Image (cartoon, grey):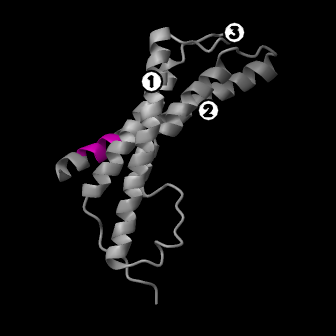
Amino acid sequence: MVPLALAITRLNAWIFRLAALVIFVIVGLMALEVVARYAFSHPTEWAPELSTLLFGPYFLLGGPHLLHLGGHVAVDIVSDRASGPFARLLVRLGFVLAAAFAGVLLYFSLPLAINSISLNETSYSSWNPVVWPAKMMLPLACFLMVAQAVAELFLPRPPEKAPPP
């Protein structure tokens, strides 16, 4: 199980790095929009909407790797005071709860994304792009989050820190 857990973690790290590059596209689009609007008095119809559609995947696809890094906001009131087996239990419980939450979100978001694909849903704006690729990112990110949370249960953990003096 450990090799599969490591493979899932590597996949999520690769997706994280790929998704992180999207911010450069978003910044470029926003810079183009600012120049077009204020320098040429001719704003684009598509740049703000495309930036919004790209921000969802940028935001969502980083979550599974951040779970591995411990980068999410956590309430550490109890876990900071815990040690030994109880601390390990709390960490595992956190991963189980993360998997359960992402699983429920996956369960409800997947039919909406599939429906969007079947209807070839568009945004109904003046630009009117298809939105199903952006809508598919939520169930994909939820699936990756469930996989990473389960993988974390099997990954070896570093030894516990010594308590502060």
Report if residue 11 lies within the magenta region: yes
The answer to whether residue 17 is visible is no
Q: Which residue is mark 2?
A: 27
**Pick the front one: 115 or 164:** 115
Dot label at residue 111: 1
**Which residue is painted at 69% across and 9% down in the image?**
126
Do the residues under discs 3 and 1 have CB atoms within 8 angstroms?
no
Around disc 3, counting alpha carbons within 10 Å, would you say few (fewer than 14), some (14 to 19), or many (20 or more)? few
- Magenta-drawn segment: 7-13
**Pick the front one: 153 or 156:** 153
Q: Which residue is mark 3?
A: 126
What amino acid is at disc 1?
Pro
**Which residue is painted at 54% across and 18% down in the image?**
131
- Left or right: where 59 falls relative to 144: right
| Location of residue 84 (image quadrant) | bottom left
**Which residue is painted at 50% across and 9% down in the image?**
119
**Which residue is painted at 43% across and 27% down in the image?**
110
Around disc 2, counting alpha carbons within 10 Å, would you say few (fewer than 14), some (14 to 19), or many (20 or more)? few
What amino acid is at disc 3?
Ser
Number of numbered discs: 3
Q: Residue furthest bottom?
A: 165
Q: Nearer the viewer, mark 3 or mark 1?
A: 1
